[in-house]
Image (cartoon, rainbow, N blue to C red):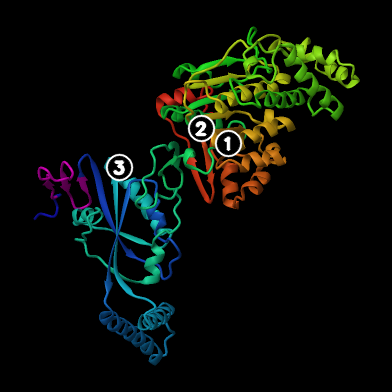
Amino acid sequence: MNLLKTPKISVRGTEGMPGPAALSVTPSHVRVGDGYAATYVVCGYPAEVGPAWLDPLLSYPGRVDVAVHLDPVVPQLAAPMLKRQRARLESSRRLDADAARLGDPMVDAAAADAADLAERVARGAAKLFEVGIYVTLHARTLDDLATLTAGVKSAAASVLLDLQPATFRHQQGWLSTLPVGVDPLRMRRVLDTTALAAAFPLASPDLPAPTPGDIAPAEGVLYGVNTTSNGVLVWNRWGQDNHNSVVLARSGAGKSYFVKLDVLRNLYQGTTVSVIDPEDEYTPLAEHVGGTVVQLGVPGVRINPLDLPDDRRPDTLTRRGLYLHTLIAVMLGAAPPPAERAALDRAITATYVRAGINADPGTWTKPAPLLRDLAEVLAGDDDPAAGQLAARLAPWTVGNFAGLFDGPTTTVPHGHLVVWSLRHLPDELRTIGTLLALDSIWSGIDTPPAGTSRGRHLVVVDEAWLLMRDGEGARFLFRMAKAARKRSAGLCVVTQDAADVLSTDLGLAVVSNAATQVLMRQSTQSIDAVVEAFNLTAGEARLLLAAPRGEGLLVAGRSRIPFRAVGSAAEHTIAVTGIGETE
């Protein structure tokens, strides 16, 4: 054969047998179908190796196949082999000593290692294996293959591994890295048990796979791409201890983009989703999927907090009274003093009685009273505390804030996606609007409409700090987080003020009650609180401080997975917030 020319061998798969469409072999690579592949052999090893010393090759971000072929060396051959090796090394050392030359430190170290290994093999503490490690690189073009080769060689050199091409034998090398268990190359090196065991990464940067024999349910949602291993991150919130999640990130880190993708992919699986949207970011998404948008603050849109849910449990009227206590405490900015609370409790019962509603469930279908009716009852009470409370409620009943409450509820949202937009509410009303929306959502989860079965329901509270900065509002959110799992619901809390949330006991309780925790880029002012709350390492803290937009860290129990949120072209168009942004 003329070696100045490039010999090529074309092989086509036999009909009915799996294989590439064609295989073209050259001295420097093989062409497999419409791509190129080249195989390299690990020929040089370091004197000492650490745990997972093959990980730079196994986790390289590219299509890299690593095959490890090993055969045990029987003890009858291992002992004479080590004896001969020790004899050669000792001979070299004695020759140097007889010639009055300085000893070679490499030979001295090798002799000591050989003696130690021989002793461990003799005691049965170690075994020897013939090991061949081959690396096959795949690329679409020869230029890409050359670039990938340079990167893989550099990664191997970082752990003192020497890669040599399988020149003229790339076909055999390609076969050696296929999952068929054959090794035509037979380029082996003897390793002991300790070095061989350290080659395998016992800690993976990916989520653990299901136990053999267990079939994972097809309910996972694509979160993105693992930035460490370049693998796919699929997470099933509905398979965890609870279905809640929390997303903490500073403004501009990509949290809204990630949450919109999560909402879309849960909708694909038939999950009902409700979103509390302070900035009207989810309206395009709702319009695209045929959802419902409730624009709180728009003229004519009203919510009556005294409405009774469609619930026939005997304590429904009592629970509505307790909710009104929470709502009025949020309106006033703090829980009223005991005298005013007692007056409020009497007034709630009297207001419903005036409307013809009492403990008899048959009366619960009558039109509910309004907030101004409650204020009138308080004003007519002889107790001075009641009159004082009525005066404090005046802005919400007859003042500037009354527009949201001055009539019966105008809309009963329904559908697979409901977005409660707070964009048109003044800042003073956004906390109240969040609480009203959560109450309406929870009523539908707690008591599904007649004729419907309870399915999975995801509740997204964007910018949850609006509610959590208020003590009573944070308690309502906490109670909802605790009770959601038993009703096949999951609460997703999204906030950019991580330090404020984590600085309160209720905020920490909401976060700790979420089995799924996603951290994206953090500010330097809040990173210390995040590190303490989530027990992050120094490396994870640095990752969050420098994370590009759209990248974050999934914290789920002991798993810490860095990932980058990715969406299809269609999903990206829906999820993007502004031009040139990914939040």
Callout 1: few (<14), some (14-19), or many (20+) C-alpha neighbours within 10 Å? Answer: many
Callout 3: few (<14), some (14-19), or many (20+) C-alpha neighbours within 10 Å? Answer: few
Q: Which residue is mark 2?
A: 258
Taking the image as shown, residue 523 lies to the left or right of residue 417, namely right
Q: Quadrant of residue 445?
A: top right
Residue drawn 43% across and 38% down?
A: 220
Closer to the eye: label 2 or 3: 2
In this view of the protein, can residue 16 be seen by the observer?
A: yes
In this view of the protein, can residue 278 be seen by the observer?
A: no
Taking the image as shown, residue 317 lies to the left or right of residue 573, namely right
Q: Which mark is residue 290?
A: none
User: Where, quadrant-wise, is the N terminus in this rendering?
Assistant: bottom left
Percent coordinates x, y for residue 486 in the rendering: 55, 36
Q: Main secondary structure of the magenta part?
A: loop
User: Where, quadrant-wise, is the C terminus in this rendering?
Assistant: top right
Q: Secondary structure at mark 1?
A: strand
Q: Residue furthest bottom?
A: 98
Closer to the eye: label 1 or 3: 1
> Is residue 13 covered in magenta?
yes
Q: Which residue is mark 1?
A: 247
Residue range corresponding to the magenta coloring:
7-31
| 160 over 473 or under it: above or below | below
Q: Which residue is mark 3?
A: 143
Camera-nearest residue between 331 and 344: 344
Camera-nearest residue between 331 and 308: 308
| 485 over 376 or under it: above or below | below
| 541 over 70 or under it: above or below | above
Percent coordinates x, y for residue 47 in the rendering: 41, 71
Q: What's the residue type where badge 2 is placed?
A: Phe
State if disc 1 and disc 2 touch (CB < 8 Å).
yes
Camera-nearest residue between 146 and 381: 381
Q: What's the residue type where badge 1 is placed?
A: Val
